[in-house]
Amino acid sequence: MLYKALLIATLLIATPHLALTASEHPHASAPEKAPQPEKEAPPARPTRTSVTKHTVAIGGKSFSYTATAAEMPLQNEAGEPEARIFYTAYTVTPAPGAPPRPLLFVFNGGPGAASVWLHLGALGPRRVEMLADGRMPKPPFHLVDNDWSWLDLGDLVFIDPVGTGYSRAAKPESAKSYASVRGDIDSVGKFIRLYLTLNNRWDAPLFLVGESYGTFRAAGLSEHLLEEGIAPSGIVLISTVLNMQTLRFDNGNELPYQLFLPSYTATAWYHGKLAPELLQDLNRTLAEVEQWASTDYLVALNRGDRLSPGERHAVAEKLSRYTGLSTKFIEERNLRIDARNFVRELLADRSQVAGYMDTRFTAENVDPAAPSGFDPTVANIRPPFTATFLDYVRKELKFESELEYYTLGGGIPSWDWDSKNSYADTSDNLRNSMAKNPYLKVFVASGVFDLATPHLASEYTMSHLGLTDRLKGNITQKRYNAGHMMYLEKGSLAKLKEDVKEFFGNVTMKQSGQDARRKE
């Protein structure tokens, strides 16, 4: 989900050993260094660990589980500490003779977001009690048992990358090395390897679950882990972005304007800003807009200044019909509508601004002259998720820390996108992973009221991976009439769990069948 994150680069330090000294060989002109096999220090076990026992009802069935809140030290080969990653794990002891339970590694995005959002919003055994439509209730805030937890599908490990949550670099000056695409993937990959080793879980079916930038991370991790000998069985991508070009409103980059348009339409539909015939059926309206965006609108964008005044006005009128914005506003912006301008203009007549991550949410626009403002979505979610987590981690999980828990930003320096003269992109990593591991299945969830990672941008990326027909069948895509965090709303939370449960069943069932055939 969300906007900033920090992460880890592994420093490999090999100390050369002086094999023979000058006094031992008096005729030698100078001492020489002889090579010696590198000795890697054994991994340090988690520190500041709290283990508690609980029960929860999921789908009418009771589950007894162990909760572990701990810090995993990351160290270099000399055994020197580099960082520590805070995580929360929920495990259920399988019945005697039962196969190993699937293991889900879960993280949010940003870069800079802790895993608290998926943890207490959708997957964990406890969740924040929001209003039924996903809006913030009146404080104080409370947790309730999560009847739609994914704990019945497998064990859950929520990871806070370095610079998020309680996770920190060992030295403040080294924090920057984690604030990069490569440092992030390396450090989270190292955490996963350590967790599998220290908890004897190498035999478990492994799944990656990411939201927003966490999907970018998951795609990169999928190939990184394969190179480490770790083959995920499945990946769940929630509010997906793998190719940053699909989101950046840069001069000369026409791609986002067409990909964001259907999300503008969905927003205008929700707020009653469309013509009556377009308000009748959202899905039908979106299909019409998506067709126009990928054909006539794309052609108009590509023609640029070669459009005649009449052609330009015709496109502006069509955009006005599909967005609820005035033709004049659109023409003044050269037929190209930035998402930040859209959310401030759409409800200007009501003195309101629409949300960015969930465009159904609104707030009073107290500074109409400002070029940008706060996102009503973030204002809606930050207080309840922060307060309930800090109460929960201390009172129920019995873990205490004097550090600030960074839920969304604040813990990392500027992010290094590891890209020059190009856009950061991990879609190639996902494609390569699927080619190298043909058993890998991918589930993609998108919200139609999301302007952080629009649904059409996600679908565009998945349809441009360049897969064979056989591998295309390994991808499942679902839409939800919700925003970036579709699980905030009870109806979409239940639908997401239902869809993911079916996805997991297909993955594990096919793997069981393949295992049986191999035994035969």
Image (cartoon, rainbow, N blue to C red):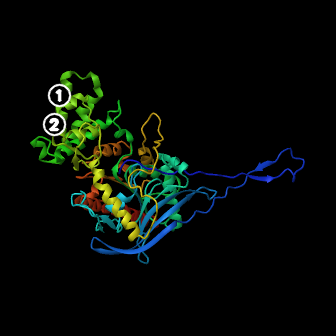
**Of residues 288 and 470, the one drawn nearer to the viewer in this rendering:** 288
Tell me if 174 is positioned left or right of 353 in this view. right
- Specify the farthest residue to the right: 27
Indicate which disc residue 321 carries.
2
Q: Secondary structure at mark 2?
A: helix
Q: CA distance from mark 1 to mark 2?
A: 11 Å
Residue drawn at x 29%, y 47% is 375
Give the vertical position of 192 relative to 376 (above or below): below
Quarter of the image where one finds residue 38: bottom right
Amino acid residing under circle 2: Arg
- Tell whether 175 sits left or right of 77: left
Look at 60% across and 55% down and name the residue there.
Answer: 76
Residue 174 in the image, given as x and y percentages of width and height? 55, 49
From the top left corner, tell me how far across and down residue 206 is, in percent. 44, 61
Tag 1's secondary structure?
Answer: helix
Query: What residue is disc 1 on?
Result: 314
